[in-house]
Structures are given as C-alpha cells and as structure tokens.
Image: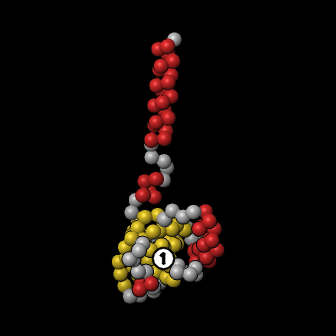
Amino acid sequence: MIRKLAWIILFAGLGTALLYGAPQAGDSKSLATQTVTGCLQKGNEAGGFFIISTENKHWELYADKGVSLADHIGHTVSVTGKLAHRTAAQEEKSQSFEKAEAANKEHADLQVSSVKHISDTCSSK
C-alpha cells in the first residue's frame, strides 16, 4: 500500500512538473525576434508609430531607448524587435487609435530594438 501511494505521489509530481515546466503555447513566438518591413507612418496616438507590413498586417511600434523612428516617417524600413507585452489598461487606451490605423487588418505590437532604412519613399501596391 505504501509503495502504491509512493507511485501515485511520484506520478502526480511529475505530471505537475511537466505541465508547468513545459513552454506554454505562443511563448516561443513572443520571445522570438521579428523583422517587419513596410512603410513607417506616424500614428494617431501621441508619439505613436506604425507599419503596414508587406504582408498587409498592422504593427504598432514601440521604440527601445536610442531607437529613432521619427527620422524615418514616410520611408520604407525594416524594424526588428520582439512582440510587445502591454497591460490591459495600455491596450484599452490605444485601442481606438489602432482600430483607425489598422482598418480591419490583422494587428500586433512590436517593441523595436533596431530600424534599418530601405528607401526614402514608400511604394504603393
């Protein structure tokens, strides 16, 4: 009986460790570096910037310290960073601006660590 109880405790402990120790869905994508290319535009929100990518996705951009997006408004750029993790309050505050900018496109937030200039102009499709 004690041996059976020991096995139950062992399996319960292993199951819990596997469940909580395993990467959660979406973790690897949110931690992965993303590079997005498109036309950099000034956002509707004060200090905001966004890109409509070549894949027609709206990316709200948040620059790391030392990254200047304002210098590239109206230019084609590639921005690199990680998915931005924003609080519910932050999302709620910017949601109306994002909806107006995105015009029903898929949307994501990117914390930009670098910007690469591609062209002084933005090509239209």
Can residue 70 be seen from the camera position used here?
A: yes
Does dot 1 land on a helix, a strand or a loop?
strand
Q: Residues within 10 Å of mark 1 (few under 14, many from 20)?
A: many
Which residue is under mark 1? 51
Q: How many marks?
A: 1
Q: State the residue lying farthest toward the front.
A: 65
Q: Position of residue 21 (x, y in %)?
A: 45, 41
Q: Position of residue 66 (x, y in %)?
A: 38, 77
Question: In the figure, 118 relative to 7: above or below?
Answer: below
> What residue is drawn where x is 38% and y is 88%?
120
> What residue is drawn where x is 51% and y is 18%?
5
Can residue 75 be seen from the camera position used here?
A: no
115 or 121, which lies in front? 115
> What residue is drawn where x is 44% and y is 77%?
38
Q: Is residue 17 left or right of residue 98?
A: left
Amino acid under disc 1: Ile
Q: State the residue lying farthest toward the top.
A: 1
Question: In the figure, 123 relative to 106: above or below?
Answer: below
> What residue is drawn where x is 51% and y is 72%?
60
48 or 125, which lies in front? 48
Q: Is residue 55 left or right of residue 46?
A: left
Q: Position of residue 57 (x, y in %)?
A: 51, 70
76 or 123, which lies in front? 76
Question: In the figure, 11 relative to 99: above or below?
Answer: above
Q: Position of residue 112 (x, y in %)?
A: 42, 71
Q: How is the image coloured?
A: secondary structure
